Image (cartoon, rainbow, N blue to C red):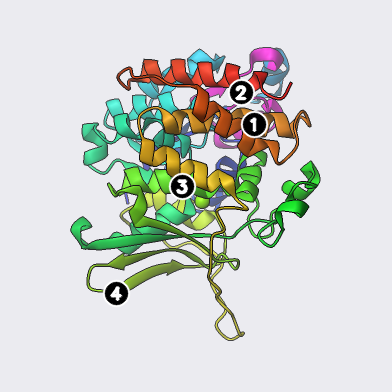
């Protein structure tokens, strides 16, 4: 592989730090041209000093002078503020953009990078959940420039190499079930923040850990898969697989299935997204078949996990519903993290937002942004 230019948005988060760990050990794969962080200026400065990108972006400018003092080299550009972050995908220098921003805030970067026909390694699933209708119509998407980093979607992509899309009968998307997979509804009503932040298999950021526990994460991933692989939502079936060894399964029209396996480790899908369609040598952990290993599958209980049901319904309704679902979920999770609402209030806020907000405008980046703002404002007024 020739050395390509990589920009990482959200480099201090879970995906960003693991990507940099890979690149530390696989020196020569990429030249890093830009790193960005929202608040964590200390880690951003450390990363910048190590990788010396030409551009560094600090979205929250509050600690700008403290940040600058920590830099041991002079980048060509230091950008502060959210507008600068949004503009980077349009103006910045890169071949591949790793978008690991959290939430709908990441959409414009995906959109702007695809407008320039750049490769996007997408860890920001909300880009597709909210804006799938827009992104999948873009020529760059049709040319295969949007590569998923999400482990399930990476698994699907890996199973589909060499297969025609008409051969897909259905996709089985696996879910760990999170920490509350065996909880009754009564027990669920007593869940606190510390319980919800404690995921059994995956080490992830706070937002996605909560989304995993409510199974909203799987709901968002079903919508993400629907857009990525152009399938109706009822052809994507979630299943609980507590070991997180099989990352997803494609069932083909002849009855055969392919699955992708590995220990739960995001470095595998991150690396694959960066090097796709090539595979490069890297010492990731592998499965140990010399020990007994059980793989279990159980169906999803949509009664105990209303968030995944709401996500599937919003995908069926289409239009702005997935955008409303996503925005109200972002606010509900944020408020739960601030201890403003109870755990079981999260689906209530989402359902109420879906029932109360509507728009029959055409879907564009601007109308998506306005429905996103409207939903956030509404979701913030609930249960006050
Ligand atoms: Mg995932």
How many residues crowd around disc 1 within 10 Å: few (fewer than 14), some, or many (20 or more)? Answer: many
Residue 377: x and y in percent read 59, 16
Are the two marked residues, 4 and 1, in contact with CB atoms closer than 8 angstroms?
A: no
Find the distance from the CA under tag 1 to the CA under tag 2. Answer: 7 Å
First in sequence: mark 3 or mark 1? Answer: 3
**Mark identifier at residue 332:** 1
Q: In the image, which residues are magenta?
A: 37-63
Q: Who is closer to the viewer here, 384 or 271?
A: 384
* Residue under the point 60% across and 50% down: 305
Are the two marked residues, 3 and 1, in contact with CB atoms closer than 8 angstroms?
A: no
First in sequence: mark 1 or mark 2? Answer: 1
Residue 96: x and y in percent read 37, 37
How many residues crowd around disc 4 within 10 Å: few (fewer than 14), some, or many (20 or more)? Answer: few
- Residue 246 versus residue 53 in the image, above or below: below
Labels 2, 4: front one: 2
Q: Is residue 119 visible?
A: yes
Residue 90: x and y in percent read 36, 20
Find the distance from the CA under tag 3 to the CA under tag 1. Answer: 18 Å
């Amino acid at each position: 592989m020739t050395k390509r230019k990589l920009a990482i948005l959200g480099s201090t988060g879970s995906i960003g730090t693991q990507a940099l760990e890979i690149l530390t050990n696989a020196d020569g794969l990429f030249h890093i041209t830009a790193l960005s962080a929202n608040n964590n200026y200390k880690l951003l400065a450390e990363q910048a000093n190590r990788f010396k990108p030409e551009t560094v972006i600090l979205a929250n400018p509050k600690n700008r002078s403290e940040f600058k003092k920590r830099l041991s080299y002079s980048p060509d550009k230091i950008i502060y503020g959210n507008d600068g972050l949004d503009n980077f995908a349009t103006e910045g220098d890169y071949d591949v953009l790793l978008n690991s921003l959290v939430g709908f805030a990441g959409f414009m970067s995906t959109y702007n990078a695809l407008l320039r026909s750049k490769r996007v390694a997408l860890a920001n699933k909300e880009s597709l959940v909210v804006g799938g209708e827009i992104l999948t119509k873009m020529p760059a998407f049709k040319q295969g420039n949007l590569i998923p980093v999400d482990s399930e979607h990476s698994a699907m992509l890996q199973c589909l190499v060499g297969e025609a899309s008409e051969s897909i009968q259905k996709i089985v998307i696996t879910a760990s079930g999170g920490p509350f997979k065996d909880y009754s509804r009564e027990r669920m009503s007593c869940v606190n923040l510390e319980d919800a932040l404690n995921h059994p298999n995956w080490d992830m950021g706070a937002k996605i850990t909560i989304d995993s526990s409510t199974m909203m994460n799987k709901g968002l991933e079903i919508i993400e898969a629907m857009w990525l692989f152009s399938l109706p939502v009822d052809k994507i079936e979630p299943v609980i697989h507590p070991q997180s060894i099989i990352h997803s399964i494609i069932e083909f029209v002849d009855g055969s299935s392919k699955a992708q396996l590995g220990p739960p480790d995001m470095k595998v899908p991150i690396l694959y997204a960066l090097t796709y369609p090539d595979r490069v040598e890297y010492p990731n952990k592998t499965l140990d078949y010399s020990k007994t290993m059980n793989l279990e599958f159980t169906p999803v209980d949509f009664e105990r996990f209303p968030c995944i049901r709401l996500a599937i319904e919003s995908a069926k309704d289409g239009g702005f519903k997935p955008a409303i679902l996503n925005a109200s979920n972002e606010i509900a999770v944020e408020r739960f993290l601030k201890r403003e609402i109870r755990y079981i209030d999260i689906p209530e806020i989402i359902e109420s937002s879906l029932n109360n907000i509507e728009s029959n405008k055409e879907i564009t980046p601007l109308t998506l942004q306005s429905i996103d703002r409207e939903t956030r404002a509404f979701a913030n007024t609930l249960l006050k």
